[in-house]
Image (cartoon, grey):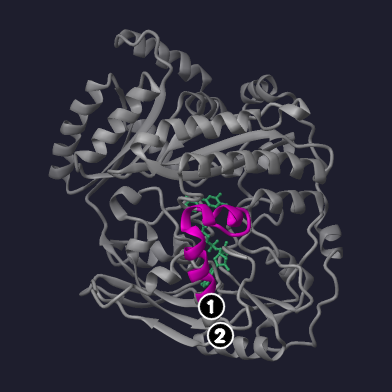
Amino acid sequence: MQRWNGWGDERIEKPLPKQAETLLEQLVGPGTPPVNVSLEKMLGNVPEANLPEPSGNISTAARDRFEHAHGQSMPDWVAMRFGTLKRFPDAVAYPTSESEVEDVFTFADKQKMIVIPYGGGTSVVGHLDVPETDAPVLSLSLERLNGLIEFDHHNRLATFGAGVKGPDLEAALRANGYTLGHYPQSYDYSTLGGWVVTRSSGQQSLYYGRIEEMFASGTALTPRGKIEFPPYPASAAGPDLRQILLGSEGRMGVLTRATVRIKRIPEKDDVYGVFFPTWEAAVHAVRELVAADLPLSMIRTSNPNETYTNLFLAGHETQIDLLKRYLRMRGLYDAVFCMTLIGFIGPSRQVAAGKQQARRIIRKYKGVTVGKSMGDAWKKNRFLAPYLRNTLWDKGYAVDTLETATTWNKVTPTMKAIESAIANALEEYGETVHVFTHLSHVYSSGSSIYTTYLFRIADTPEETMERWRKIKASASREIVRAGGTISHQHGVGTDHRQYLAAEKGELGIDMLKNIFSHIDPQQRMNPGKLIE
Ligand SMILES: Cc1cc2nc3c(=O)[nH]c(=O)nc-3n(C[C@H](O)[C@H](O)[C@H](O)COP(=O)(O)OP(=O)(O)OC[C@H]3O[C@@H](n4cnc5c(N)ncnc54)[C@H](O)[C@@H]3O)c2cc1C
């Protein structure tokens, strides 16, 4: 059963080791466990639906409406935990076929409803916020459009209902010896349709690519009719319309089915741990590793703060001492340690040759390889880290992340600017923010920068939100100032909307507005997300 007011399966707990709690107290001060509102109280806040009694697959039950009223952003968490969620869809539709989606559109049109497509509800940037409006709001859940529709081994394509979640999609492909290889950390709950329209990126994107490289074709139902995107392997026939759907965040209509490019399950898919003695060494090594065109699936390198924080949060502080001793034996006396995970993938012989070449680059930068066990542990726990957010909240700490991408020459200054903006954002309240960063999606021209920050929850939802807004705004302004994109993988939603013009330009924003108002003249599809 999914947690109603937090992340993931309610049977899974990730306790915080005692030493980690002590460390947090030292870093940001003792947390005060907040009082969580009960589900009963929360459902009591759901008002009467602004809709005549609907029929068929449309529900007006309070629980359905609450569950579809939020995602997983910090404002969503504050509203869920303090019980301040204000706006709920009036109904939730659960179509089971494309023709039922068409019926839902007809119904919504008749009732003049706003329609918000809902995939897995894992958005972290306010994609699912119910707008302030007098019009009734319908959440259109893709939950029941979730099957394998066609497996095309010959063309290496597979078509799924857009509501399929990560584990179901992979299970269907793996049963046939194939994989998509798209593993966002939200994999257990996010959906193929959600990935496409938010331009998602999975943990092994270095080999498998981002979702935009995997998404071959699909069907979208829009307020103006159906759009079919054909699965050409490539095309020079003018602008690629798929690129407008990718990242459209529900503004263009509903993606009902998607065809993806699939790959054979690789012979080798291993992850190794390496420690670099300085951040600069780690970044140089990573850049050279990517440029060497090795059979890599991923590189994830943590800065010293993240290295220590992660080892502590995982209860591995004794390992830090062992590691220090081991690294000293290898001649690294003043090391600060940047934990780096390097994934090798592909045929065994290619991987063996790639590893040899990688070893030379790692040695050049005084990196110390600690073997596959660290990589195996990461693989085992790769989707569990978000469970810590539940535990930390209950101890009085809020955790959030933000991310950008930029070219190599700007990676370190941008990371430092973001971290410093976040660390100082709550000075006026006398509060400290703990902040740490890793690079996880690397390209020959640059890298994503993924920053996590932790701060104390205040006594009231208003003050907690005020703290979060200060941090988020300071960091976002730094990202824009440094010339990074406002999002590498989470999308725009409502939280990043005001920063979008900085990278698209006024003309670009105008183009997007015109596209959306052409396809959705009544402005009924997820209004207010991505652009005003
Ligand atoms: C713990 C955690 C870890 C995460 N890790 C990653 C990560 O590693 N990489 C990454 O890229 N993202 C990550 N995310 C962000 C999030 O999972 C992605 O943005 C994901 O793609 C959202 O998919 P979803 O199915 O949950 O969509 P939802 O959250 O339900 O919706 C997101 C947006 O897409 C629209 N939408 C959804 N389905 C459709 C459809 N079929 N047709 C039209 N519009 C649709 C919605 O209207 C909304 O605007 C993470 C989130 C969490 C909470």
Please tell me whether residue 253 is drawn above or below residue 263 in the rendered image: below
Q: Is residue 487 magenta?
A: no
* Amino acid type at mark 2: Pro
Q: Is residue 491 magenta?
A: yes
Please tell me whether residue 114 is drawn above or below residue 403 in the rendered image: below
Q: Say which residue label 1 marks.
A: 253
Q: What's the distance in space between the residues labelled 2 and 1, CA to CA?
A: 7 Å
Q: 362 and 67: which one is in front?
A: 362
Q: Is residue 351 left or right of residue 106?
A: left
Disc 1 residue: CB within 8 Å of ligand 1: yes
Which label belongs to residue 223?
A: 2
Q: Quick one: label 2 or label 1, which is nearer the N terminus? A: 2
The residue depicted at 36 percent of the width and 13 percent of the height is: 326
Q: Quadrant of residue 388?
A: top right
Q: 527 and 363: which one is in front?
A: 527
At which x and y percent is residue 100? Answer: 56, 88
